[in-house]
Image (cartoon, grey):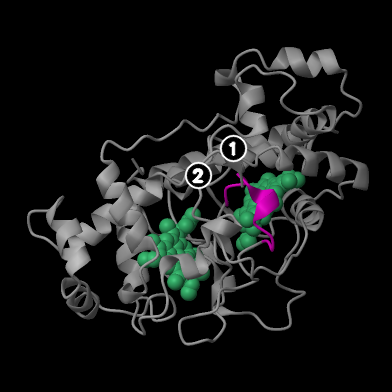
Amino acid sequence: MLVKSLHRYYLLGSCLLLAGLLVFHSTTPEKDFPQETVVSSITNSANQPILPILPYISANQTKVQLGEKLFHEPMLSENGRVSCSSCHNLKTAGHDGLPTSIDIRGGMDELNTPTLFNASLNYSLSWTGHIKTLEEQIETVMHNPKHMGSSWERAMGRMRADKTYQGLFQSIYPDGVTDEAVIDALSEYERTLITPDSPFDRYLKGELNAINKQAKAGYELFKSYGCISCHQGQNVGGQLFAKFGLFRSFFNEKDKLTNADLGRYRVTGKAVDRHVFRVPSLRNVARTAPYFHDGSITTLPDAVRYMGDLQLGRRIPDEDVGLIVSFLESLTGIYQGRAL
Ligand code: HEC
Ligand code: HEC
């Protein structure tokens, strides 16, 4: 499902971004949208730059159940104490709520843990977007000394000795407990971690009272300021790459630059990729504080102010910030019958 050709998206993304900035940067956002105008603009969600999330029903529920068990399985980590859910806690919106994750040895990572909800809808994975598929990401995280810090040999040795796992794997995979099977079940489970039916999605689908007046006005501002040129599509982001700090540097204010602050430069080695990051999804963003790759910004209104300043060269007045936040709050979706 994940698009392989990142390069094409990078180019497409750059064009959309430029077009978006040209159009939006020069327009002054209107205030006081008459209710009718906003309502009548949502007649067909296919014309909107944001699309509703579609439910994902796996064809193999047994595989999903195994994947869920593996997601919480500490045997997969080097010290036998850390599982995917230690950092991507589904009870707290799929992340750990910390500025940067605590690595497996108890030290601080340099990166904020992204939520796993809707990660399968991103065109590329990680803050630098250098990982293309959920399967590839599991390979990476298993060997990442800060995350699982393990090797397949060691992890599989432990799991093969476990009678329950032997039975569970045998019932789906003829070769039993293997790294390929772990990757397959785990990634299928991750695909089920999506949050459709947010109030905003219901609104897009025609339920005009699903969001309030403030959120509607916030959506219009989100478009007219130009946020939409980067945060768009089904995941309201996750599609493009952009330099963090187009109009002003975020990093001049920092006491000490970390390796992670270099962005895609770390993975491509190209000067143009310095401080370039994958534009993150804004789905459930009201539940995923703190913000940015280094988790340095604590509140959503502040994140919105920084975006106006750094990405659009605009100081967004407080009233507009409040409306945009109302819109962003309407992006909180439903998982297993409950809002995140
Ligand atoms: C010690 C904390 C930690 C653990 C344990 C951990 N992760 Fe992560 N995860 C992170 C951090 C931090 C990132 C961001 C890494 C980056 O951008 O390079 C991340 C990124 C991801 C992403 C990319 C999300 C996106 O939208 O780009 C996926 C998918 C993911 N992890 C899945 C897993 C799975 C599956 C496991 C268990 C096998 C796991 N993680 C274990 C901290 C952790
Ligand atoms: C030029 C592209 C671009 C534009 C325009 C843009 N953003 Fe962003 N946005 C990004 C990038 C890139 C990041 C990730 C920055 C980082 O942490 O390194 C980001 C991060 C965010 C975050 C934090 C998400 C998280 O999970 O940490 C929020 C909230 C946000 N943007 C909202 C907005 C709003 C609101 C606007 C309009 C006022 C906007 N953005 C305009 C590219 C853009």
Give the residue displayed 45% in from the left and 82% down from the top.
104
14 inside magenta stretch: no
Q: Looking at this view, is 76 or 213 the one in front?
A: 76
Residue 60 found in image quarter: top left
Mark 1: few, some, or many residues within 10 Å (few <14, many ≥20)?
many
The residue type indicated by label 1 comes to Gln
Q: Taking the image as drawn, is residue 265 in sight?
A: no
Say what secondary structure mark 2 lies in: loop
Q: Quadrant of residue 51?
A: top right
Separation of disc 2 and disc 1 at Cα?
A: 8 Å
Type of amino acid under label 2: Gln
Main SS of the magenta part reads loop
Residue 22: x and y, percent? 70, 36
How many neighbours does mark 2 have within 10 angstroms: few (below 14), some (14-19), or many (20 or more)?
many
> Is 100 or 63 nearer to us in this picture?
63
| Residue 7 x, y percent position in the rendering | 39, 48
Residue 120 location in percent, x, y? 42, 46
Residue identifier under label 2: 239
Q: Is residue 249 above or below residue 74?
A: above
CB contact under 8 Å: marks 2 and 1: yes
Residue 333: tell me if it is visible. Answer: yes
Tell whether 23 sits left or right of 175.
right
Magenta segment boundaries in residue numbering: 280-291
The circle drawn on residue 232 is 1
Q: What residue lies at 53% left-to-right and 40% top-to-bottom?
A: 195
Q: Secondary structure at mark 1?
A: loop
Residue at x 51% of width, y 42% of height: 336
